Image (cartoon, rainbow, N blue to C red):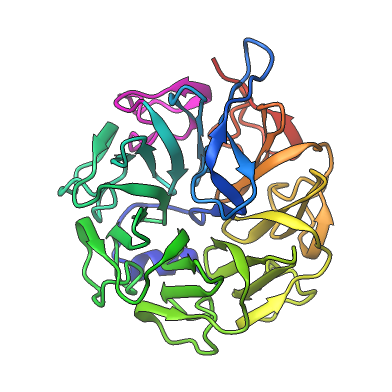
Amino acid sequence: MDRRKFLKFAGISAAVTEVLGGHLQQAYGATWQKLSGTGSTTISKTRLPLRGSRRRNRPIGGGQAHSVALRSDGAVFACGYNLYGQLGDNTTTSRLTYIQVTGISNAIAVDCGPYHTVALRSDGLVFTSGYNLAGALGDNSTTDRSTFVQATGISNAVSVVCGNYDTLALRSDGLVFGCGTNVYGQLGDNSVTNRSTFVQAIGISNAVAIDAEGAHTVALRSDGLVFTCGHDFYGQLGNNSTTSRSTFIQATGISNAIAVASGFYYTVALRSDGLVYACGANDYGQLGDNSVTNRSTFVQAIGISNAIAIASGNSHVVALRSDGLVFSCGLNMYGQLGINSTVSKSTFVQATGISNAAAVFCGSEHTIVLRSDGLVFSCGYNIAGGMGDNSTTSRSTFVQAFGP
């Protein structure tokens, strides 16, 4: 599938040659414990979510070629590609190691799109930086920002995520709001009009988790049902059709979900029994069902059980097992599966060089793991330094990221 063709459809004029975005959702609680890491040259004391109920916030995010991490004191750090100011450090200089960003403090959650970043402050306000052609920063403009600015139309937020050129927020009352590109109805507001301020989505209430990627959005309702909207050419909405939707509709073939994740043209859900289900595009085996056949309803992935967290990149999926081991499937061109090869996999296989994992995250073509000691490890695409290991070398096994 030609992602550049998709970008043309979406009305995006930025010259890009790589596929975009990638995120996670994780079955962890919305409260945090402070955990100190070791070493003065590492990202340490990264916020760790407590295991238990549905997770709404994330302490790490990965974009096209940049990453962002949240420290236990609410400070935000970023590394990698910075042409549009997405690192938020008041420059457009790319960075090979994590540096502290400006304009945001007391943050409790972060996430990345391909070229923009979002942070949620402890008072429920949303701040953004980076690329803004379609209004993804939500500041009622289409001006790029190299420092974090406050988004408008949203307050009392408890979770934030980035799509490709859109941003979504979950409010404390269970309602979903979004801004940015909306060509396929991915904001769920019953239109295909781009929005530069946050607007409320239709067809979803009592949401406890959200994610966005490509041009579609997924929401998890408190009763374990999954709802989706937006682009559906490959069945990624999971409603047994390939018809795009501009309001949220219920997906089929999945119930008792505790976490959701959105890939570029596919959707993943984690069920309460620890099994992983997925639907949509499957050209690289990212659905994990031992095939490369697209699916318009959720099917069970193979090779993973007892999962407690999931994350999705453009075309790869990562799962965290209850014993702290990491498993992955899908596209592996840059080593993003962390299996010491660049061979793609259509079923879940165990990643090497990582254990005692506490959380998993995906960028577009790279993977990030937060270990239980608060240290950050990465593998995959690294041409612009998005892995934060002070290099531009892509890695097929996990290496430790470096910071202040």
Magenta stretch: residue 381 in it?
no
| Residue sticking out furthest to the top | 40
Please state the horizontal and vertical placement of residue 329, each as a whole percent of the image.
Answer: 74, 60
The answer to which image quadrant residue 355 occupies is: top right
Tell me residue 211's x, y (percent): 47, 59
Looking at the image, residue 282 sits to the left or right of residue 102; the answer is right
The answer to which quarter of the image holds residue 45 is top right
**Outermost residue, bottom direction?**
241
Residue stretch rendered in magenta on the structure: 79-105
Residue 194, x across and y down, in percent = 23, 64
- Of residue 144 and residue 109, the one placed in the foreground of this image is 109
Relative side of 296 to 82, left or right: right
- How many numbered tags mark residues here? 0
Residue 88 covered by magenta stretch: yes
Q: Residue at x 37, y 61 (%)?
A: 174
Q: In this view, does 3 lie to the left or right of 116?
A: right
71 is higher (above) or lower (below) than 311: above
Q: Up-down: is 385 above or below 277?
A: above
Name the one closer to the observer, 197 or 21: 197
Camera-side residue: 310 or 108?
108
Q: Is residue 362 left or right of residue 136?
A: right
What residue lies at 81% left-to-right and 70% top-to-bottom?
302
Residue drawn where x is 33% and y is 63% of the image: 175
